[in-house]
Each structure stands twice: as structure tokens, then as C-alpha cells.
Image: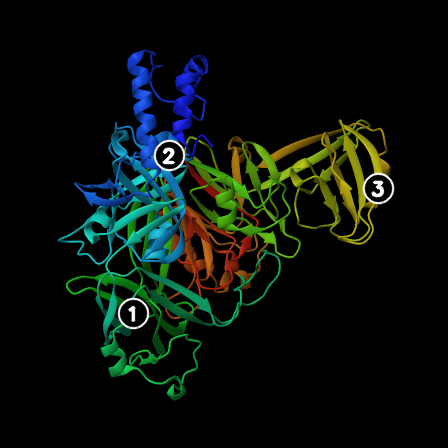
Amino acid sequence: MVRKHPEIMLLSLLLNAGEGDRLIERPDSQFSIPGKPWKRGPGFAISLLCALALSLIGSAGEANTHTLKGGAIQTKPASAGYSINMAVQTPMEEELDPGFSVVAQGDRNRVIRQGTELSWNGQGRSLDWISWSPDGNPTQIRYGFTETDLMQQMGVEFLNTDDARIQPVRWFSDPESQPLNLPVVWHQGRRYLDITPLAEHQGWELRESGQMLEVTSPGATVAGIEQGEQPGGDRIVLDLNGTPLFTVSSTPLERTEEEDPDPDGVQDSRPPALPLQEFVITLDATLTPELLNARAVAKENLTTATDSPGERTIALTLGQTGFVGLIDTSGDRTTLRLQIPQMWRPRVWTDRNPNRLIIDIQPDVVTERNILWASGVRWRQQLIEVADSRFPVVWLELNHRNASNTVLKPITANPGLPGIAELSQIASRLGANAAINAGFFNRNNQLPLGAIRENGRWLSSPILNRGAIAWNDSGSAIIGRLSLEETLTTGAGETLPVLFLNSGYVKAGMSRYTPDWGESYTTLIDNENIVVVEGGRITQHLQGEKAGESTFAIPETGFLLTLRSFASALPKLPIGTSVLINRVTVPSYFDIYPHILGAGPVLVNNNWIVLDPEAEQFNQNFIEGKASRSAIGQTEDGRLVIAIVHHRTNGPGPTLTEMAQIMQQLGSINALNLDGGGSTTLFLGGQLLEHPPRIIPRIHNGLGIFLQSE
């Protein structure tokens, strides 16, 4: 009630002197006003009454319309009278992050609105936006959009930069003569771009209505279509009257999920052939009547089937690649559909004088990027040549050693270890700014198959002496093969090996499950013997039945021992016996690092390719198979490189030897293969980078990058 009507709060302050002072002085109050407490007197009462009157007058008007003037957006009342946009009106009021915000350094930048919807010339879509006023001046409004929305919802192209405070973009502009440099603003851990320069350049009008930001821009039409060939591919050019929003999406025509040649590092299978995709570009623009009359054909005369909703359609045949395309218009939107191989990534970009949308279609087209995304994080994309193949590579360079704001942590799908989820969901839930998938897991029972250590606590043990990366919060890291040896010693002096800790890997012998696994353990094979340990003593012997059907609670102050085909050990573990766990990390220097993630195999050591499938118990087919790959490397100057490769320009992804060579070319002197195939995902700022258009994979664990305020 008070938030909607600040005049009530002001009147309350006037009439209730004591409580008014307390509200003003309390820094934690939702109504607190920064600065020193006001002294009441005649001037105070008059000021409050004036503010009350002005607020009541302004509340009769509608939402404010904002137009650009002098580099900021001016507030113009939508109706006669006064309109005051006071900070106390806004429930979302909070400071822009002072550690990251670069807009008007030293000013009192305040977020005064935050919303999740955009109306563009009457067309609604989801989009996260914020607005704020430099110097606390409510008549000077600036707007920020998330970078994900700018790229995916508006078609804005990001250009290279070495300044983390500024993001140059191309959007119907000339980056040489008319660069559009959008200031970077961090808010609630997310990277927003100040679109005020873009709005000023395009002449937009913006109007806030609750969670909705309404944008009015000049209408646009598609006036011409040109086709041409270029080396190895085709080009489509749409001549435009105006500057429409456009989105780019793709949908697999066959919903198959690529598999790694050895998805959990244990079994062998071959990846299926990559299917076709429907590549779709949607513009908020219409085809001109002249263009339709000249080139449109009736649907019944089309040789290619389409689900296009348009009344008339323009058919395209691409001469170099031989693919077919369809352009149709419906309402205020125009849609271009192309059927191309799923591994292809056409480049879609804009030009001006005249305004044009350009689509380059060829197997090796890659939008190269070299963007200092944040202090300590650089976003790179490039074609890398290995022997006679070319690979589109996407990677992040992490200056973990020298950037105090960059924190790396293992991340998992759930608080307990069983379970899988999409990488973007895991990162968003935990507040990670970037992430990559990491260790192997069993996709059927969703259990980890490798090392996970966080803040010095082992969540899951390594398996099979496989490769791992370990690091600390000071920026030091190592890569190598790793084992964890646990032994259980009883009060009677019996010593038994513990094969695995909190692991989905099954082998005859004894394994251990702690509360880090979750509240309970469900048997993985038939007839497991369960030994319950609480407070350092064995309290129960239990018997499992069929795999997946027997569940046992894990004690909060102890653990479970599960004996698989190892019932002979039960007499050595009588109820009431005290037990002690001893642990040794091999090699021992891994133990000084609080964070560890395991996968394998090790690709590069001291700049030498060291693939050894036998040492890490991988089979040779796993080494030679071609699939999507994820990897992490360490450069000579201590930077970390996290990279993904989905395919080569003319076929499937790299072998592990090729991936090792790619990591060398990215500057890695040490490198580790991570889980690949369908698990291969790289997340940055709310989006998956260059992910093929198939089902988004669910993974078990990953490496999260968290940016802290400096």
C-alpha cells in the first residue's frame, strides 16, 4: 500500500514524529532514506506537504514516456500536470553493484525499476531490463538489457574489446565510422549493457508500465532479397527499410542426442551421424507488396513442404550449397527458414547505408571473438587448424591467478550427489557467471564417476587413477592422474580397504557413503550387505535385496559401508566395534589443494601430448573416437583455458589427440579432457555458447566461475 502511494508514507512521517525518525535512521528499513536524519521544523512540514501534493497530482497521470536527450533518457509526463518518479515508489530499489558498475563512477546510480517483459512496437517478448538515474535525478533515465537478451532477442552482434567496462556492438551500424560502445553494468551478479547509446542512435521511445518496458521505433519492411555465391558457400541479403529486431534460432529435424564414444569412460559406443537442422531467422518486419508481387508463389506450387503460416511464400534455392529456403510474412513478422546440416553455424550480421541483414551460409563460417568479458574472464572463438581439419573452437581464458574477483568452485546438479540437470540451470541456481561441464557420470542412475572435492571436503573419490585438476583460491593449479586410498581400521586391529567414496562406480569390495551423498543410499547391485557406522562405531548390519529397490538412511553423524560380493568381511565388522578411516592422496601434493575435479585422460603435460589410455583404464576406441569435446588447460603464465569443440567444419568432432593439439594451440602446457559428447556445454552470462540445436544435455557436475565485487 505504502509503496504504491508514497504520499501515505510522507503523511505518516509528518503525523508520527517519533516513528518517522526511526524509519529515516534505520538502514535496514525498506523505506530508509540515505543520508543524515532530517530535523523537523516548519520547513520540514512544508516540504512534506508540497511533496504530498505533487505526488497526488502526479499519480493521476499515466506511465511516463522517455526520450533521449543529451546522452540520457528524459522523462516526459504522459498527461498534463506534474509527474514525480521518486525512489521510494519502487520496490526493486537498490544500488548498482559498486564493484562492477562503470556508469558514472562516483555518482549515486540507483536502480529504480526492474522488469522482465519487453513490448516492441506492440509485439511482446520476455526480456530482463533495469533502469536507473545518474546522480539520483529521476528525470534522467538510463536503461540496461542483459547481454543474452541483446544477442538472442534483438540480434545485436558483439565486437572485440580489451576494455571490460565497454562492450562495442554492431546493430545496423558501421563499427569503423560509427562505433556503438555500450557501457557495462553489473547488477545482482548479472552483466547488463547500457542501451542508452543504442536507443539514442536509433531514435527509440521507451515507456515503462510495471514489469513491461514498451519500446516504439520506426517500422521496418523487407524491400528486396538478393542471393549470391561465395567460396564454399552462399550469401542471402535482405534489403531493409528501417532497423527491425531479429532473432536467430534452430531446431533439429531429428531429435538425437550425440553420445561420446565412451560416455561414462567405461563402455564403448559410436556417435550417430549429425542430422539436419531448420535454421530460422525471424524479423519484426513485413515484406513489401512490390516484393511479394514480384517473387511470391502460391503454396500449392511449392515443391518443398512448409508449415509456414504466411499467405504467400518466396522460395529460395542456394546455388553453391544446394539447400532450399523459404521466406514468408505473417502479420508484422517475416520468417526465413533454411534446412542445413546441424553442425553448420551461419553468420547473421547487419550493415547500414543501406540497411541490410546478411546471412553467410558455409561449413566453416565462424564469428571470431576476443572479448574481455569481465576482469579475469576473456571470451574467445576462432577456427583452429589441426593437420587437414579445421575446428570451430569456443573457449574462456580465466586469469585466476591475477584477478582477485574470479573464484572457481566445483558445482553439482543437486545438494546431494545423485541427480543431473542442464548446466545453465545449475549455474543459475548457484549464481555462477560462467561454467563448463566437468566429470563423468552414469546417465542411467545419475551418479558421479570421478573426483569432486570442494573446500577441502571430498564429495566423491577419484576412480581408476584418472586425470584431475586441482586448484586453490590463490590461483595455483595442477593437472595430473589422481587416486584416493582409504582404509578402515577397527578397534580389534582389522584393516580393510575402502575402494570408493560416494561413487557410482561399482566393483567387488567395500565402498563408503557419507551424508554428502544425500539423506539415503539406494543399492546399486543385488544383495549388498550394508554396515551402518554412527559416532565412530558400527551400530547395524542390514541386507539389501534387488538393485535400485533397497534404500537405507545415511546417519548424520556417520556413514554407510556397502559390501558388494564381499560378505566375507562381515565377521571383521561386528556391531559395537569402533572404526577409524585413514586416507592418503596419491600423489600427495594433490592434498594441499582444496578444490578438485576429475575426468580424464590427461591430454598434455609440460607441453607434451601424453595420452595413455591404459594408465587411466580407457580403451583405445575412446581415444580414437570423434565426438564433441570439453577440456581445461593451464598456460605457462598461470591462466586457465576452458574450451569446447563440437565438430570440424566438414564432419564430426575431434579425436582426443586432435583435442590435445587444439589445447596446445590455445597456449596450454598442461591439459585435461573433460566429459564430452552430448555433455559438452559452456555457459557464460545466461547463455550456452555455440551449442548445437539438439536436446540440451543434462550433466552431473561442472566447474563454476563466480565473479566477486572487488
Disc assigned to residue 346: none
Q: Residues within 10 Å of mark 2 (few under 14, many from 20)?
A: some
Mark 2–mark 1 CB contact (< 8 Å): no
Amino acid marked by disc 3: Leu
Residue at 23% across, 59% down? 218
Observer-nearest of 482 and 697: 697
In the figure, 307 relative to 30: above or below? below
Disc assigned to residue 542: 3
- The colour scheme of the drawn protein is rainbow
Labels 2 and 3: the sequence-earlier one: 2
**Residue 188 on image: x %, y %:** 41, 37
Q: CA distance from mark 2 to mark 1?
A: 52 Å
Residue at 37% across, 39% down? 113
Q: Which residue is mark 1?
A: 286
Disc assigned to residue 401: 2
Image quarter of residue 50:
top left
Residue 605, visible in the rendered structure: no
In the figure, 58 relative to 609: above or below? above
Residue at 60% across, 40% down? 415
